[in-house]
């Protein structure tokens, strides 16, 4: 499994970005694909997760109503549309795959435990939001 993120950049507060995660090496069936972020000096945290089996999406509270995760199965790509960006959204963003598809419990579980669920990770893309 290989994941490649793209779409990061510098944007002003209130602006928007679309991140892409190109997935190769397996066929979308029943997996969880998550977006995570890690700011300097902080732990990696989950932001959103998409269940490929039914398209259900789950979000961390701070991004609800601002971020949308969706998939294009034909392109084997998962997107995260980020709107109303804030300086505190500045981080390196990663996508990752959970072969057991535990998206529905991701944001109710211990963060360190959740990180271990995800087997394959991309290299990350930097998002910087200026005030």
Image (spheres, grey):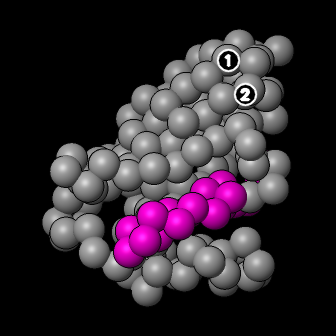
Helix, strand or loop at label 2? It is loop
- Disc on the earlier residue, 1 or 2: 1
Q: Which mark is residue 88?
A: none
- Residues packed near mark 2 inside 10 Å, few (<14), some (14 to 19) or many (20 plus): many
Residue 48 in percent (x, y) is at 61, 57
Point out the image quarter for the N terminus.
Answer: bottom left
Residue appearing at x 74%, y 82% in the figure: 109
Please state which of residues 50 and 26 is positioned toward the viewer in this rendering: 50
* 3D distance between C-alphas at marks 1 and 2: 5 Å
User: Residue 40: in sight, yes or no?
Assistant: no
Q: Which residues are magenta?
A: 41-59
Residue designated by label 2: 85
Contact between marks 1 and 2 (CB within 8 A): the answer is: yes
Quadrant housing the C terminus: top right
For label 1, the residue is 15
Q: Which residue is found at the position 26% from the left and 68% from the top?
A: 28
Residue at the (72%, 27%) spot, across then down: 85
């Amino acid at each position: 499994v290989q994941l490649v993120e793209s779409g990061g950049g510098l944007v002003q507060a209130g602006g928007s970005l679309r991140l892409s995660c190109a997935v190769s090496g397996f066929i979308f069936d029943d997996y969880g694909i998550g977006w995570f972020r890690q700011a300097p000096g902080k732990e990696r945290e989950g932001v959103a997760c998409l269940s490929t089996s039914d398209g259900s999406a789950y979000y961390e509270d701070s991004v609800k109503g601002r971020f949308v995760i969706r998939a294009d199965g034909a392109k084997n790509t998962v997107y995260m549309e980020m709107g109303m960006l804030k300086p505190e959204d500045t981080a390196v963003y990663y996508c990752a795959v959970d072969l057991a598809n535990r998206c529905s419990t991701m944001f109710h579980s211990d963060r360190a435990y959740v990180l271990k669920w995800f087997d394959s990770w991309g290299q990350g893309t930097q998002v910087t939001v200026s005030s």
